[in-house]
Amino acid sequence: MLEIKNVTKRYNMKKALDNVSLSIPQGELVGLFGENGAGKTTLMKCILGYTSYTGSITLDGERISHKNIGRIAFATSEHSFFPNLSPNGHAEFYASQFATFNRRRFDVLMDFFELPRGRAAKRLSTGQKNQFEVVLALSQGADYILMDEPFSGNDIFNREDFYKVLLGILGERETVLLSTHLIEEVSSFIGRAVLIHKGQITGDVSMSDLEDSGEGLVDYVKRAWNYRADRIARAIDELGEDS
Amino acid sequence: MKKHFSVFLLMARYMLWPALIVTALGAGASVFMLSRELEKMGYMQSTLLDGAVFSFYGGLALLYILLLLPMRGQGGVHPRYTLRRLGVSELTSYIWQAAASAMALFIYTAGQAAALAGYSLYLQSADGSLAGNMTAIVLLYSSGISHGIMPLSDWPVYFQLIAELFALGCGAAYFSFKSRTGKIAVSPFVLLAAAVFSMAMYTDVGDYIHVGLFTGFSLFISALFIYGVYYRSNNFDEEDADFSGGVSREG
């Protein structure tokens, strides 16, 4: 269980996370949704201990340190790997660092994305770098896989295929926390949706509950964020008055 | 142990080729400089090997600059987050990078020592009018550079050399560590200048006060770098500020 309790993070005077509490048991596919600057990335960085915060984050009751951080994988969309090392070199290095590294899954996903194996990682295209980061995160053998906008730069066909592969390969105890703007696209793949707005958790719902209520995920998100549909008409009206 | 060794190999693989290439070029340049120095002198003087001073320090500076480059972001790829979530701590990764850099510098100094010793032995054996039986020993002991990197039986100087190489390794790895946070560290360059100054000072055989001072200073500097990495990898607020954009400079 990944337990986040009363986590607050400030950048200077601004609160990036405000008293966030969240429990994520193993085996869930969780969508983390929020506007730009809502605190999604900051929350993931706090989980990994990349930034300071107040409150507590534990993994099965233990503080996260380099001793248990191997249980968490991270696809950042910032291309966090070694520039001059090839994908195959990364696989060997990861295998030496993470006893759970899944070479078979790595090979299958590399073939799926048709990624070159011998080229230095810095020479991959932007889309390939994103894909490679996801491949590494999924192959690490981690219990918790954090993905922060992992599909930017990939076309919709690639993304849809990937969701299907993701559902097919994930083990029962593997958990994915997926941060993305593509709410509609992932709504049929996730089991739970967590909404974050201005650093606060504003919604947390299981997809089955949502389905029972008859409300779609996008409508739920709009309601939780007090989305004002009339603002478009108002803006157009105002522009019309000016001209 | 496998985790540690793989981190060391990861660091060392970027440093081996630069070290071998600069070592070969530096050794060739030193032999060339010495042959020109001998021509200028007309006859062999005890300070002949000091003629390789520019090639030695030039090669050292070049290799040091090359050692600053690995493990920083390149081509839109940034290893920072991965290095912070390995099975070994960020500080441990840093120490392995420092050790790999020190080994690269050691390869370079060993190449230079071999070039100086080889040239001295060549002179001793090649031309009887230029040299006698003790020529090589006299040359190696009487030159500041050769005594600093190959002190023969003056063994305490080896401690000074190893301490200086490790301090330089720590400096190079520190530059890399800071560049991963978007900053440029100036202190490794100051250290390089200090190391050149230290190595350039001739140490009389048996002058162990000098040896002790420079060894102690090098160890102190290494400890400061290691503490700097330890402190920064456990205090993130400063690192957070880096994401405000741009590259800043600090010590």
Image: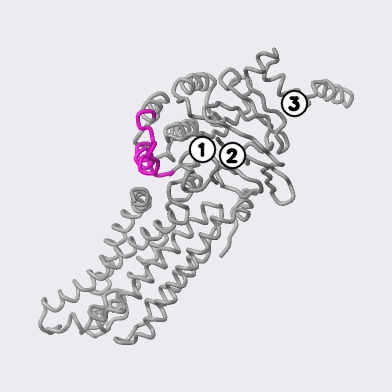
Disc 2 and disc 3 in contact, CB within 8 angstroms: no
Q: Residue at x 11, y 79 (%)?
A: B127
Residue visible at 67% across and 13% down in the picture: A212
> Who is closer to the viewer here, A51 or B115?
A51
Are discs 2 and 1 less than 8 Å apart at CB?
yes
Asked whether residue B109 is drawn in magenta, I would say no
Q: Compare marks 2 and 1 and give the one earlier in the sequence.
A: 2
Q: Kindly identify which chain the residue marked by label 3 belongs to.
A: A
- Furthest residue toward right: A241
Answer with mark 1 or mark 3, whichever residue precedes in sequence: 1
The amino acid beneath tag 1 is Phe
Along the polypeptide, which appears first: circle 2 or circle 3? Answer: 2
Three-letter residue code for mark 3: Ala
Residue at the spot of label 2: A44
Residue A181, x across and y down, in percent: 63, 28
One can see residue B66 in this view = no
Disc number placed over residue A224 in the picture, else none: 3
Chain at numbered mark 1: A
Left or right of A9? Residue A171 is: left
- Let me know if marks 2 and 3 both belong to one chain: yes
The chain holding disc 2 is: A
A90 vs A78, left or right, is left
Give SS at disc 2: helix
The x, y position of residue B164, in whole percent, is: 38, 71
Q: Which residues are magenta?
A: A82-105
